[in-house]
Structure formats: C-alpha cells, structure tokens
Amino acid sequence: MDLTHIVVLALLQGITEFLPVSSSAHLILPSQVLGWPDQGLAFDVAVHVGTLLAVIFYYLTDLVKIAVATLESIVKRRLNSLSKLGWFIIIGTIPAGLCGLLFEDLVSTAARSMQLIGFTTIFFGLLLGLASYCNRKLCWRSIQTMMGERADTLSHLTLKQTLIIGCAQAIALIPGTSRSGITLTAGLFLGLRPEAAARFSFLLSIPIILASGLLEGLKLYTHPELAVVDPMEMLIGVFLSFITAICVIHLFMKYISKSGMALFVIYRLVLGAALLYLSYFAL
C-alpha cells in the first residue's frame, strides 16, 4: 500500500470506531470509489489494535479501579458499584461473543455487500434518532419528578439493562450497524444519560475489540500468507488510529453532554444514501 492508502484507512478506523456512524460503511468506500486494493487482514488487525489501545489508555484509571474491585468481589463475595460495573462489562460481552463465533462466516460474507451496508446505515441511523428523541422526553419527565436527579448513571445500571445493551451489541455483527451506535441507541432507549450510555458503550467495546483482534491474529498465525503488510505500514496504522481514536473519544464525550444525536443521524442518512447510489448506479 502507498502512504496515502495507509493514512486514509488508519484515520477512518480511528475516527469511526467509536462514533455512531459505522466504521464498515466508511472502510468500504475507498476500495469501491477509488479502486484501491483490499488492505488485507494484517492491516485490519493493526488499526484495530490502535483503537483498542486508545480506549484502554483513555479509561486506564477507571479500568484499573474496576478490575481491582471485581477481583476483590470474588474474594470478599461482596459487590460495590465498581465491581458490579466490572461484572456487567463481562456479562454484556457474552451475547456478541457467542453470536460472533456462531455467525462469523455469514458476517464476513455479508460484509462485502455495499447495498446491505447502505440500508443498515440508514435504518440504524433513524433508530438512533428515535432513541435520542425518546431519551430527551424521558429526561424532561425525570427532571420534573426527581428535581434534577436521575437514577441513570452507571452506578445505577441494572442487570436487565446490561443484557439488553449486550444483545444490542450482538446486532452490530450486521455490517453497517455500528457497534457504538447500536449500544448507544439501546442505552438511550433505556433512559441512560447520553454520556453514561456512551461511557458504557466504550467500556463494553474493550473485550469485543480484544477478542476480535485475537481471533484475527490467530488467523494470521495459522495462515501466514495473509500477513503481507510491511511492518512499518502496520506501525503507522497503529499509531494513527491510536491518536485519532483518543481525540475522537474525548471530543465525542464533550459533544454529547451538550448536544443531541441529530448530527450523526443526518450524517448516517447521507452516507447510506451515497452507498446505495454507488451500489446501484455508479459502480
């Protein structure tokens, strides 16, 4: 790959991994529109490692506290808010993990369909908009009845809510859905504040991205002919996706604390329409 190819794909991965806009919808565009060759499995693993390191780095202090509290809960057989969150992250990961193992081949085949990605980008974008609207209405009622206090922070997250968000994350196996988008959508429908829903979405992404990276890494180990990317290209991909993802997480958390999801909904509608146009008329 040339440098432009590397930079564009790494930046796309870093920007879209944690925004509710579907990274698969973006990563398909360069190859389809510009005629670039497939970047290969090794480079995909590299840029995912970059985004994984980014979310771990951003939440490192929280993750250490959650991990320590979760281990202590095993020894002391007593839960607190941090250990409960740790167990909820584990439990919320199970549905997507099971579905990933069961439907891996089907998903990898469906991912090649630009039409599917276009339709799902639009549909789940509209669903995100509906969730945001319902959440604002719920927020207003809650503020009226609870004098400004809502029991929707992660310390008040329930097992039922966790399972619903975890099952929503499994739906993200459908290309174009957006893992962060569908988990954020579920959290908003459940009444979580947008920043709380986003934080849980990001924490929940860590085991899934890690498991996905290990699985793809195992494929590279068993099929070394797939590892055709130059090591320097992979390092550039990791670095750029890492830096970009950290910036995106930080800016996104600031943005949603003040604004709604309208910008992302409109963007998804435009992107989905562009993909459908390209798939039916331009290519």
Image: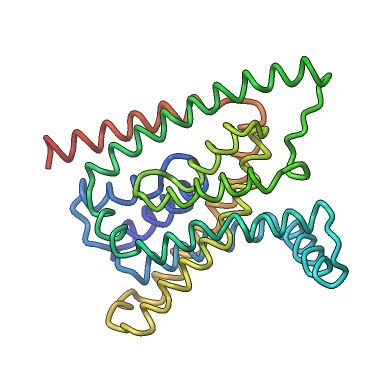
Q: With respect to residue 88, does 160 lie above or below?
A: above
On screen, residue 125 versus residue 191, left or right, reads: left
**Please, which residue is most extreme toward the top here?**
144
Which image quadrant for residue 106? bottom left
Query: Of residues 47 and 195, which is closer to you in this image?
Result: 195
User: How are the residues colored?
Assistant: rainbow
Q: Residue at x 76, y 60 (%)?
A: 66
Q: Position of residue 65 (x, y in %)?
A: 80, 61
Q: Residue at x 44, y 68 (%)?
A: 46
Which image quadrant for residue 157? top right
Q: With respect to residue 135, does 226 lie above or below?
A: below
- Which quadrant is home to the N terminus? bottom left
Q: Residue at x 64, y 45 (%)?
A: 160
Q: Position of residue 236 (x, y in %)?
A: 45, 66
Which image quadrant for residue 271? top left
On screen, residue 1 versus residue 244, left or right, reads: left
